[in-house]
Image: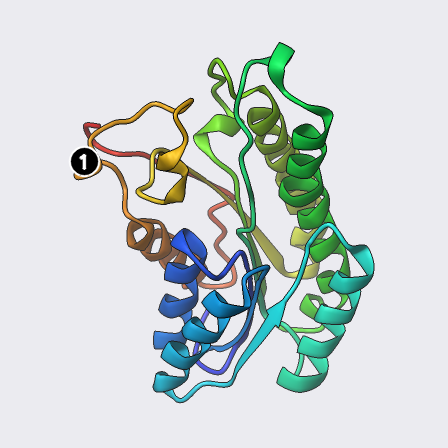
Amino acid sequence: MDIKNKVAVVTGAGKGIGRAISMALAKEGASLAILSRNKKDLDLLAREASNYGNKTLPITIDLSRESLIKNAISEVAAKLGGVDILINNAGLGRFGRIEELTSKDWDEMFETNLRGMFLCIRETLPHLKRKSESVIVNISSLAGKNTFAGGAGYCATKWGVMALSKCLMLEERENGVRTIVVCPGSVDTHFFAHPSLPNPKRDKVLKPQDVADTIMTAIKLPQRAMVSEIELRPTNP
């Protein structure tokens, strides 16, 4: 896929991996719809991305709200001319032992990490299927394949992302929509601040740009080729 002049939607765009992906797409000439809860982060990203001469549409949104997702995708299609690329990056983690994990924490993770992703996919698919080539990238995690103490809720959502992505790939490949699920290991983002998580040396773990570069390589493959799943981990954390 030639990314220049394509329209890309990125959720969780304000920080970390989402921000790195957004900037990588901007540098390749894509028009961007950047979605996040934090307006300040979005405005800063929009200014930086616009330096590359692209249209950039920041949308402040709570992905637990179905009506807001429907409105956002409709706005993107109307203002930017459809959708070619959907990057589902938004996610949050609430960590703790199962006996200590609150129902609120559990529900918040499933609403954003899995339900929000499902809704973004469902609302965007009609636009993607109108294109001659299109792609959906879902950011999962190695926690979607491996468990750890204190991660029950987070791991459950990421296992769900894996299942959702694999079903989506089988359903939509015949319609020309490529589906890629990406499973990063330890990445140097705000997740490191939580005391329940392992704390490898930050200079040895992945950087958000590493994840973005990998995704860009996969997206740029010709339409006939699809990397359906990527595991990306630090060499020696």
At which x and y percent is residue 233? 31, 34
Going 66% across and 49% down the picture, which residue do you hit?
117
Instruction: Tell me: residue 147, above or below residue 186.
Output: above
Taking the image as shown, residue 5 lies to the left or right of residue 195, namely right
Residue 220 in view in this figure: yes
Going 49% across and 83% down the picture, which residue do you hit?
5
Is 182 or 21 nearer to us in this picture?
21
Taking the image as shown, residue 124 lies to the left or right of residue 149, namely right
Is 217 or 93 nearer to us in this picture?
93
At which x and y percent is residue 200? 25, 27
Q: Give SS at disc 1.
A: loop
- Location of mark 1 (residue): 204
Residue 221 in view in this figure: no
Q: Quadrant of residue 105?
A: top right
Q: Amino acid at mark 1?
A: Lys
Taking the image as shown, residue 89 lies to the left or right of residue 218, namely right
